Image (cartoon, helix red, strand yellow):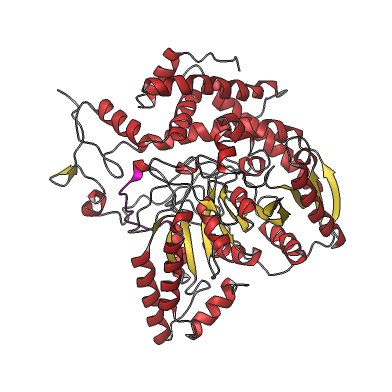
C-alpha cells in the first residue's frame, strides 16, 4: 500500500463521489485526520506473504437461491408512507433533465 | 434489590399474578423519569401498552405462550420496529416509521415480548462511546456515574439494562464490539453470536459482513434466553445460517482449555483492568479449567486497520441509499439529482458519519481499491486463520473486554479519531472473524465495572454460556 497523499483536490473528488458538500472548516478538519488515519492503516503493508484469498464474509457461505415466484410485498400506499415527495402514487424526485 | 430473571418473570406473568398493563405503565414512567440519562431515542408507549393489553386478553383466553411473555424488551435504534420511529441514531432517518418489523423483533413479539422503545447509539454504530451521536441526539450517561460514557455503540441498551430495577432485556447489535464494550462499561452481560446465527433482516446496516444482532441482560441466563429466541434461519437474510441455538443451563469450566490472549494484557491495557481480569481467570482455574497463555500477534497488530477499512468501505456503500427521497429526512426539491442528494446528505449526516463515508469511498475508489479494501479483505483471511489455529488447542479465549473503565466525557473529547479506534483493540478481532463472544462483569475499578470477554469458535455459544456462568456464580 503506497502511502496515499490526501490533498484538498483528492478530498473534494472523494466527497463528490460520496455526494457530500464539504464546508471549508470541514475540509480543514478532515484533511489531516484522513491522512493520519490512512497512514496508520497502511501498516497492513507490513503483513508478510499476504497471498490469501480475500474473505468477503467471516464464514464460508453458500449461494442462496429461491424459487422465482412473486411474493407478498409492500403495497403502493405503504411504500409511499415515509416520503414527503410523492405525486399520483409515485415518488417525486428532483429534475433529471432541464 | 435482585430483579426477577426473565424466565421467572415470564412464568409469573403467565399465571396472571403480574398485571402486565400496570407493570408496563410503571416501567414506562421510570424510563420517562430517567429521560436525562438518554438511554432511549424513542419510547414506544402506545405499542407497549397495546401489547400489554393483548397479552392480558391472552391470559383470559388461556392462550398465554412464549418464553418472553410480558417481558419488557428494548431494541437498539438501528433495528426496525413497525410503526416506531427507527433512526439508527441519525438525523437522516428522522421521521422514518418502518412498515415492517425486523425478523428479530417479530420473533421476540411472537414469544410475548413487550417492546418499550428504541435505545440510543452512535450514529449508525460509528463509535465506541455512544458520543458520536447524530445531529440533535444526546449521548447516554452511564448509570453508575453520569459523567462517564455507557460505551458504544449499543450504549443505550447497556445503560437501561444496568439502570433497570425491573426485569428487562435488550436487543443490541455489534459490528466491531458494540455489544461487548458497553456491556463492559455498564457491568451487564452482552452476548454477540456467530455471524449469521441471527437474522439481519430489518437491521439498518452499518457493514454487512460484520453486523451481528445480539442480546444484553443483567445475567448470562437472561441474555442467553433472549439470544435463543431471536436466533435461527431466515430466508429473508441471504447470509443467515441454517442453525439455531439452544442453551442447556449449566455452569462448568471443568477440563475446559482456556487461552489467555497475551497481547491483551500488556501495553495499552490499564493495569487495574488487567489485574481484575486475571483474578477471574484464576477463578476459572480453581473450577477445573486448564489455563495457558496464547499469542495472537497478527490479530493484535492488524485487526484494527483491517476492520476499519472493511467497515468503512461497506458503510460508505450502505449509506449511499440515504438521499431524501423515499424515507427519512427530506429537503425542498430543487436543483439536479446530484445537487439535491448532496444537500440532503450534507445537512443530515453527523461528523463521524461523514468521516467514515469519505474514508470508505476513498478505499473503494479506482486506483486505491486493491491497495486498501482488497488488502484488508486478504488480511481478514489471515486473522481468521490465526483464530482457527488457536481453537485447535483451546475451547475458549479470554481477555479484558476493554483496555480501560468507562471514560469521562471530557476525556473522550480529547481523543483523536485514530485514538478512539484504537480503543477497540480487544473486541475487534473476534468481530472481524465473526466469532461468538460474551462480556460479563469481572469486578470494579474506581467503582466502575470491568468486563471480561470470552470468545469461542463459530457456533460454540454453549461453551461460552457454561464458562460465563461459572464466572458469574463466583462474583
- Reply above or below: B166 against B90: below
Q: Quadrant of the C terminus of chain B?
A: bottom right
**Considering depth in this image, is B84 or A66 the residue closer to the camera?**
B84
Q: Is residue B408 visible?
A: yes
Q: Residue at x 46, y 19 (%)?
A: B366
Q: Quadrant of the N terminus of chain B?
A: bottom right
**Considering depth in this image, is B360 or B280 the residue closer to the camera?**
B280
Q: Quadrant of residue B286?
A: bottom right
Q: Position of residue B14 (x, y in %)?
A: 49, 82
Q: Which residues are magenta?
A: B93-102
**Considering depth in this image, is B152 or A10 the residue closer to the camera?**
B152
- Reply above or below: B346 against B79: above
Q: Position of residue B200 (x, y in %)?
A: 48, 51
Q: Position of residue B162 (x, y in %)?
A: 58, 60
Q: Is residue B99 magenta?
A: yes
Q: Position of residue B11 (x, y in %)?
A: 55, 80
Residue B268 located left or right of residue A77: right
Q: Is residue A53 visible?
A: no
**Considering depth in this image, is B253 or B358 the residue closer to the camera?**
B358
Amino acid at each position: 500500500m503506497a502511502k496515499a497523499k490526501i490533498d484538498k483536490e483528492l478530498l473534494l473528488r472523494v466527497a463528490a463521489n460520496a455526494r457530500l458538500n464539504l464546508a471549508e472548516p470541514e475540509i480543514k478538519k478532515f484533511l489531516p485526520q484522513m491522512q493520519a488515519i490512512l497512514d496508520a492503516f497502511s501498516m497492513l503493508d507490513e503483513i508478510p506473504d499476504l497471498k490469501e484469498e480475500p474473505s468477503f464474509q467471516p464464514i464460508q457461505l453458500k449461494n442462496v437461491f429461491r424459487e422465482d415466484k412473486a411474493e407478498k410485498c409492500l403495497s403502493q400506499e405503504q411504500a409511499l408512507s415515509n416520503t414527503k415527495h410523492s405525486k399520483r402514487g409515485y415518488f417525486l424526485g428532483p429534475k433529471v433533465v432541464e | 434489590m435482585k430483579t426477577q430473571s426473565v424466565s421467572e418473570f415470564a412464568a409469573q406473568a403467565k399465571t396472571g399474578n403480574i398485571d402486565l398493563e400496570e407493570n408496563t405503565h410503571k416501567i414506562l414512567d421510570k424510563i420517562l423519569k430517567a429521560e436525562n440519562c438518554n438511554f432511549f431515542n424513542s419510547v414506544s408507549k402506545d405499542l407497549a401498552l397495546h401489547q400489554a393489553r393483548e397479552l392480558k386478553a391472552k391470559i383470559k383466553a388461556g392462550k398465554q405462550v412464549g418464553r418472553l411473555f410480558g417481558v419488557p424488551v428494548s431494541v437498539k435504534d438501528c433495528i426496525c420496529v413497525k410503526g416506531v420511529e427507527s433512526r439508527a441514531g441519525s438525523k437522516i432517518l428522522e421521521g422514518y416509521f418502518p412498515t415492517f418489523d425486523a425478523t428479530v423483533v417479530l420473533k421476540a413479539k411472537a414469544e410475548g415480548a413487550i417492546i418499550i422503545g428504541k435505545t440510543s447509539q452512535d450514529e449508525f454504530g460509528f463509535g465506541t462511546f455512544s458520543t458520536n451521536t447524530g445531529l440533535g441526539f444526546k449521548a447516554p450517561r452511564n448509570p453508575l456515574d453520569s459523567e462517564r460514557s455507557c460505551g458504544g455503540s449499543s450504549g443505550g441498551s447497556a445503560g437501561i439494562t444496568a439502570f433497570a430495577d425491573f426485569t428487562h432485556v435488550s436487543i443490541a447489535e455489534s459490528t466491531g464490539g458494540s455489544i461487548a464494550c458497553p456491556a463492559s462499561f455498564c457491568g451487564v452481560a452482552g452476548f454477540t453470536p456467530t455471524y449469521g446465527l441471527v437474522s439481519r433482516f430489518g437491521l439498518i446496516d452499518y457493514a454487512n459482513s460484520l453486523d451481528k444482532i445480539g442480546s444484553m441482560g443483567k445475567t448470562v441466563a437472561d441474555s442467553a434466553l433472549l439470544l435463543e429466541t431471536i436466533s435461527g434461519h431466515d430466508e429473508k437474510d441471504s447470509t443467515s445460517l441454517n442453525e439455531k441455538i439452544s442453551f442447556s443451563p449449566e455452569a462448568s469450566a471443568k477440563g475446559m482449555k482456556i487461552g489467555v490472549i497475551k497481547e491483551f494484557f500488556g501495553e495499552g491495557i490499564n493495569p487495574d483492568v488487567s489485574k481484575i481480569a486475571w483474578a477471574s481467570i484464576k477463578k476459572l482455574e480453581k473450577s477445573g479449567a486448564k489455563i495457558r497463555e496464547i499469542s495472537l500477534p497478527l490479530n493484535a497488530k492488524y485487526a484494527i486497520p483491517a476492520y476499519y477499512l472493511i467497515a468503512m468501505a461497506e458503510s460508505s456503500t450502505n449509506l449511499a441509499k440515504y438521499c431524501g427521497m423515499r424515507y427519512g429526512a427530506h429537503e425542498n426539491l430543487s436543483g439536479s439529482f446530484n445537487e439535491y442528494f448532496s444537500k440532503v446528505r450534507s445537512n443530515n449526516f453527523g461528523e463521524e458519519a461523514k468521516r467514515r463515508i469519505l474514508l470508505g469511498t476513498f478505499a473503494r475508489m479506482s486506483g486505491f481499491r486493491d491497495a486498501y479494501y482488497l488488502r484488508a479483505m486478504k488480511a481478514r483471511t489471515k486473522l481468521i486463520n490465526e483464530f482457527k489455529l488457536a481453537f485447535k488447542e483451546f475451547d475458549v479465549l479470554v481477555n479484558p473486554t476493554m483496555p480501560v473503565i468507562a471514560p469521562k466525557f471530557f476525556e473522550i473529547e480529547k481523543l483523536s479519531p485514530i485514538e478512539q479506534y484504537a480503543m477497540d483493540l480487544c473486541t475487534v478481532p473476534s468481530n472481524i472473524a465473526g466469532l461468538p463472544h460474551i462480556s460479563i462483569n469481572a469486578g470494579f475499578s474506581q467503582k466502575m465495572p470491568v468486563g471480561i470477554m470470552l470468545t469461542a469458535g463459530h457456533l460454540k455459544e454453549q461453551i461460552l454460556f457454561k464458562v460465563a456462568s461459572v464466572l458469574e456464580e463466583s462474583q
